[in-house]
Amino acid sequence: MSLTREDVSYVADLARLEFSDAEVLSLAEDLGAVLDYAETLNKLDTSAVKPTEHVLPVQNVFREDEIKPGLSNEEALSNAPDSEAGCFKVPPVLE
């Protein structure tokens, strides 16, 4: 599929990009080659391939969730530079 200079310029305008005339010609050729390759891939028969098929077997590698005791509020705040009413106290970020 060949792209025209106008096609590339139109897409560049949508993306708010500016290209020289030489760059537009080069991009038209390069993008045309990418679209040609995509068209070649579209011609392949993939009817026997599952939509989620992988080359290697896929397995869940996550561990099971286990409830474990956490820090108490006092332990969590023990190294805090400043705390108030059981919460971390930080400097204001808005004036």
Image (cartoon, helix red, strand yellow):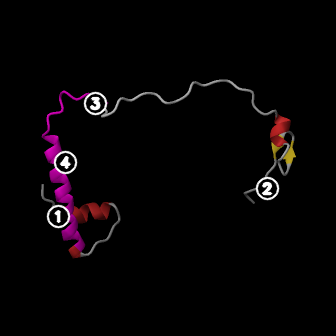
Residue at disc 2, secondary structure: loop
Comparing labels 1 and 2, the label whose residue is closer to the camera: 1
How far apart are labels 3 and 1 at the CA level? 32 Å
Please tell me which residue is depicted at 85% across the width and 46% down the height of the picture.
83
Classify the position of the C terminus by image quarter.
bottom right
Is the residue 56 above or below the residue 38 in the image?
A: above
Residue 31 in magenta?
yes
- Describe residue 36's horizontal placement relative to residue 9 as left or right: left
Q: Residues within 10 Å of mark 2 (few under 14, many from 20)?
A: few
The residue singled out by tag 4 in the image is 38
Q: Quadrant of residue 6?
A: bottom left
- Residue type highlighted by circle 3: Pro
How far apart are labels 3 and 4 at the CA level? 18 Å
Q: Residues within 10 Å of mark 1 (few under 14, many from 20)?
A: some
Looking at the image, tell me whether mark 1 or mark 2 is earlier in sequence order: 1
* Foreground residue among 41 and 15: 41
The residue singled out by tag 2 in the image is 91
How far apart are labels 1 and 2 at the CA level? 56 Å
* Residue 32 spot, x, y in % from top left: 17, 58
